[in-house]
Image (cartoon, rainbow, N blue to C red):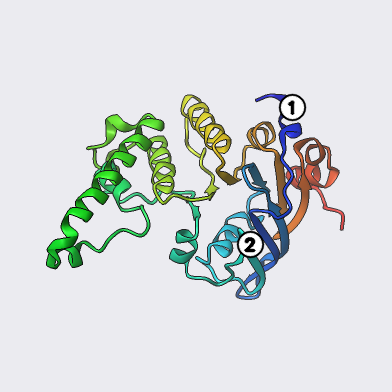
Amino acid sequence: MSETIESERQTADDPMLAVSNLTKTFSGITAVDGVSFDVQEGEMTGLIGPNGAGKSTTFNCITNLVEPGEGEVVFDGEDITGMQTHDIARDGLVRTFQIARELREMTVLENMMVSPKDQTETALAAVLPGMRNSVRKEEQVMVEQAWETLDFFEIDHLAYEFAGTLSGGQRKLLELARALMADPDMVLLDEPFAGVNPTLEDRLLDRLHELTDQGYTFLIVEHDIDLIMNNCVDVIVMHQGRLLAEGPPSTVRNDERVVDAYLGGEVAE
C-alpha cells in the first residue's frame, strides 16, 4: 500500500457514521465507556485495541445487537440509536462477525440469495398470478447479482457447495460477499482477516480497496496493527472501553499511549 494513502483522504461536511458518547455496561462492568468517533464516507477506517478493549461491543451497540446504555449513533444523517438491527441494515449499514455466520446447510448461492433487501413476498405472489412474472424477473436479477459478486471474490466455483464445507478463509469471503448483496453504503467488518492465509488476505484487501474506490465505506476491527496502518486512512484506538487515540496512521503510530497500551504499560489520562 502506498505511503501516500493519508494524503488521499477526502474531506466531508458530515461523516457517514458519527458515534457520540457510546456507553455499555454489563453487570456493573463498563465495556464501552463514553466512546465518540466519526467515519468519513468512501474511506477504509480501522478500529484497533488490545483484547478486551471493547471493539466488538462497540460494533454490537452501533448495530443494536446490544442496546447501548447511553450515547447516540448517527448514520448518513439519521439517528439510528436503538433502531431494530434489520432496519439498520435496510438503511444501508451492515456488518460481518468474528466467526462467520453462514447458513451451513444451504449452498453458497442460496446463502447469497437471502441477503437482498426489499424482496417481494413469494408467498403473496403465489396467490396473485399477476405478480408471478414480476417475482421471476426479480429473482433473475438477484441471481445475476449473486454470480457477479461471487466472481468478484473469486468463489463462484463454490456456488453449489454447502456453506458448511467451506474453509475458514472461504467463509470470510462468503460473508463479505453476502453483506454486499444487501446493497449497503457502509460495512462494519469484525476481524475479517482472522484465520485467513496470507494469499487470501491479499486478495481480500485488494477487493476492499476496489470497493472503497467504488464508494463503499468500511470500518474494520483488526488485531494486525501493521495491516490497519498500511491500508486505512484513519485509525481509531480503544483501550479498556475508552477511546485512546484517533487520526491518520502516522499520528496514531507515534502516540506513546497507544504504544503503552499494546505493550501492557499504564495509559496516561
Q: Residue at x 12, y 62 (%)?
A: 129
Cα distance, mark 1 to mark 2? 30 Å
Q: Nearer the viewer, residue 169 or 220?
A: 220
Dot 1 lies on which element? Answer: helix
Residue 106 place in picture, x, y as percent: 24, 48
Q: Quadrant of the C terminus?
A: bottom right
Give the answer, above or below, for where 70 lies relative to 138. below
Query: Label 1 amino acid?
Result: Thr
Q: x, y (%) of residue 236?
A: 71, 48
Residue 77 is tagged as: 2
Dot 1, how many residues are within 10 Å of its Cα: few (below 14), some (14-19), or many (20+)? few
Element type at marker 2?
A: loop
Q: Nearer the viewer, residue 253 or 113?
A: 113
What quarter of the picture does the N terminus occupy?
Answer: top right
Query: Which is more toward the observer, 178 or 27?
Result: 178
Residue carrying label 1: 4
- State how many labels appear: 2
Q: Residue at x 50, y 63 (%)?
A: 88
Dot 1 and dot 2 residues touching (CB under 8 Å) = no
Q: Is residue 18 at least partly visible in the picture?
A: yes
Tell us which disc is closer to us: 1 or 2: 2
The amino acid marked with disc number 2 is Gly
Whether residue 106 can be seen here: no
